[in-house]
Image (tube, rainbow, N blue to C red):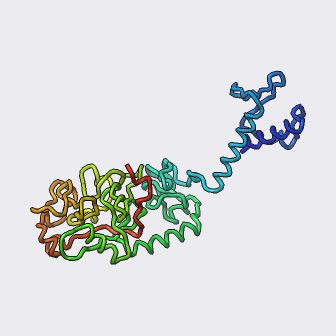
């Protein structure tokens, strides 16, 4: 701020013919980041790092750019101000919020605990509790408390949160084989939208994908464990319920479902197995007929993921 104030004052002085006068005592008392002098012979501004700019208009342009940047910051900068955390924690901006890694070393009540951060700009799921923040004298404020209240209200009707910020409800399909139509109807009964198996399937305009560019879901399948779903961070108890879950895909009316550590189309015959996955259910394999008939002794009905979102086919970040 000191550097910007100095440049703006310099421009005003030059414009009014006061470039040869000394700064006022008030301004001279302010600390500035750079010192510069005017060279009347070459009409250059020489900055303390030795670089020159060939005219005062260059300085004016730079000051104008800085002022514009400050205006943009005030109306919503891409990266909000840094958040508060604990000694021992390293924090960085990960859209859509701040996250902190490592283990806290102070205060004693937090020593050894996984790092979190305080404030509205922290990612959900990485935010400290009010008590944790107060241990370092930080009040997260009413805005955070109201957001958390709304979030807990949303979770009442959800089975888990995907990526810490997307409540997901697991919904049973009607009896019969899993198809895209059956998935859509199951979610519609709850006024919800199916989750696409892969971000490319948003082109169908019938499902929602969290697979935006730069996220762990991008270009990966929910139905496929190896090198795909294994990176999603889905809770273990939910993973054990996933066999028999089917996801909307783009192959006629057929959907995709986990099969062993890979996936298969729901029109396949033969046994559905859970080989080579880390969190299998108690019953390791079933026939398609068991799922079609909602056999409660096995995996029950076919099921799917539903969310309270509209299909996001217009989001360019879901495209390859």
Which residue is situated farthest in the top direction here?
A: 41
How many discs mark residues in the rendered view? Answer: 0
Does 17 sit above or below residue 202?
above
Which residue is situated farthest in the front direction here?
A: 252
Q: Nearer the viewer, residue 49 or 127?
A: 49
| Residue 29 in which image quadrant | top right
Q: Position of residue 83 (x, y in %)?
A: 56, 54
Task: State left or right for residue 113 relative to residue 231.
Answer: right
| Residue 115 in which image quadrant | bottom left
Q: Position of residue 52 (x, y in %)?
A: 71, 26
Q: Residue at x 90, y 34 (%)?
A: 21
| Residue 222 in which image quadrant | bottom left
Q: Position of residue 72 (x, y in %)?
A: 64, 51
Task: State left or right for residue 224 relative to residue 295.
Answer: right
Q: Position of residue 96 (x, y in %)?
A: 49, 56
Q: Nearer the viewer, residue 134 or 5?
A: 5
Q: Nearer the viewer, residue 299 or 105?
A: 299
Task: State left or right for residue 123 relative to residue 49.
Answer: left
Q: Residue at x 49, y 72 (%)?
A: 150
The N terminus: image quadrant: top right
Q: Residue at x 19, y 65 (%)?
A: 281
């Amino acid at each position: 701020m000191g550097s910007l104030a100095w440049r703006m004052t310099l421009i005003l002085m030059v414009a009014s013919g006061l470039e040869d006068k000394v700064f006022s005592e008030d301004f001279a008392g302010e600390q500035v980041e750079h010192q510069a002098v005017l060279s009347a012979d070459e009409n250059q501004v020489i900055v303390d790092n030795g670089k020159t700019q060939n005219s005062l208009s260059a300085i004016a342009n730079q000051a104008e750019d800085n002022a514009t940047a400050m205006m943009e910051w005030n109306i919503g900068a891409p990266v909000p101000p840094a958040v508060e955390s604990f000694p021992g924690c390293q924090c960085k901006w990960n859209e859509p919020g701040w996250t902190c890694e490592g283990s806290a070393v102070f205060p004693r009540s937090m020593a050894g605990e996984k790092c979190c951060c305080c404030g509205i700009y922290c990612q959900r799921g990485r935010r400290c509790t009010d008590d944790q923040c107060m241990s370092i004298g930080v009040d997260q404020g009413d805005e955070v408390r109201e957001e958390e209240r709304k979030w807990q209200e949303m979770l009442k009707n959800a089975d888990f949160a995907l990526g810490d910020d997307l409540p997901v409800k697991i919904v049973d399909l009607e009896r019969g084989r899993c198809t895209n139509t059956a998935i859509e109807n199951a979610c519609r009964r709850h006024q919800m939208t199916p989750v696409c198996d892969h971000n490319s399937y948003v082109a169908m305009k019938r499902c929602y994908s969290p697979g935006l560019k730069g996220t762990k879901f991008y270009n990966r399948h929910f139905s496929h464990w190896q090198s795909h779903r294994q990176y999603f961070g889905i809770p273990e108890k939910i993973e054990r319920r996933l066999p028999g879950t089917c996801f909307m895909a783009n192959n006629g009316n057929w959907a995709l479902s986990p099969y062993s550590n890979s996936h298969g189309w729901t029109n396949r015959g033969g046994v559905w197995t859970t080989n080579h996955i880390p969190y299998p259910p108690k019953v390791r394999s079933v026939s398609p007929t068991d799922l079609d008939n909602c056999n409660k002794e096995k995996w029950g009905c076919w099921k799917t993921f539903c969310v309270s979102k509209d299909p996001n086919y217009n989001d360019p970040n879901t495209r390859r």
